Image (spheres, rainbow, N blue to C red):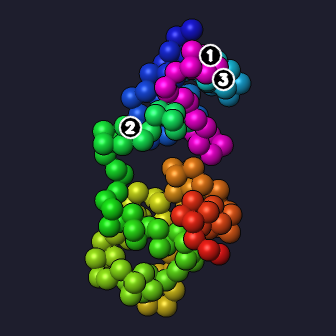
Amino acid sequence: MKAKQLIEAALFVSTDPVSIEELYRITGISSREEIDEAIDALIREYDEKNSALEIRRIGDDSYIMQARDAFSTPLLDLVKPVVSDDVLKTLSIIALRQPITQAEVVKARGYRTYSHVKELLAKEFIAAEPKGRTKLLTTTQKFADYFSLPGEILQLKKELARQLNIEE
């Protein structure tokens, strides 16, 4: 099936999750059911051959091909991070303490935080809304999907605390 092969190729070459809309465009298929059948078949094939790769659903309408968790640690040196360590530290503070003002993050992380926030907004990992002379920062669904975390803020904070072994 050519559509299944196109979907597999799209997932293989993309470093970002591929949306159902993009798969419609790539394959020429307009039926969600047909796309779902092709993806389900690919998922089964990768599982049956015990592949080091897997196809994972991200949110409700996107998919990504990635190395299975069991293989991720030895491959870490090959993967370029989506953000630098400094930006990741800023993102961690935002995620754990959200909603948090930009002023509070700057107080905790210093003035370089302004450029971190700008980068995180551009990558759509955080959202900002005006609050007086500062901004109120929260993480987005894209952040939750990218890091395989729950989208709801309280659940996200609990999961992050659990993963980081932080007392709540």
Q: Residues within 10 Å of mark 1 (few under 14, many from 20)?
A: few
> Going 49% across and 27% down the picture, which residue do you hit?
53
Q: Residues within 10 Å of mark 3 (few under 14, many from 20)?
A: few
Mark sitting on residue 74:
2
User: Where is 122 relative to 48, above or below?
Assistant: below
Task: Tell me which numbered mark, 1 or 2, is placed earlier along the sequence.
Answer: 1
The three-letter code of the residue at mark 1 reads Glu
For this rendering, which residue is in front, 53 or 38? Answer: 53
Which tag is nearer the camera, tag 1 or tag 2? 2
Which tag is nearer the camera, tag 3 or tag 1? 1
The answer to whether any part of residue 108 appears in the image is yes
The residue where tag 1 is placed is 48
- Left/right placement of residue 6 relative to residue 41 reads left
- Secondary structure of the residue carrying numbered label 2: helix
Task: Tell me which numbered mark, 3 or 2, is placed earlier along the sequence.
Answer: 3
Task: Farthest residue to the bottom: give it.
Answer: 132
- Secondary structure of the residue carrying numbered label 1: helix
Q: Quadrant of residue 46?
A: top right
Q: Residues within 10 Å of mark 2 (few under 14, many from 20)?
A: few
For this rendering, which residue is in front, 148 or 36? Answer: 148
Mark 2 and mark 1 in contact (Cβ < 8 Å)? Answer: no
Task: Tell me which numbered mark, 3 or 1, is placed earlier along the sequence.
Answer: 3
> Going 40% across and 71% down the picture, which residue do you hit?
90
Task: State which region is magenta.
Answer: 44-62
- Secondary structure of the residue carrying numbered label 3: helix
The residue where tag 3 is placed is 40
Distance between mark 3 and mark 1 Cα atoms: 12 Å
User: Where is 140 relative to 22, above or below?
Assistant: below
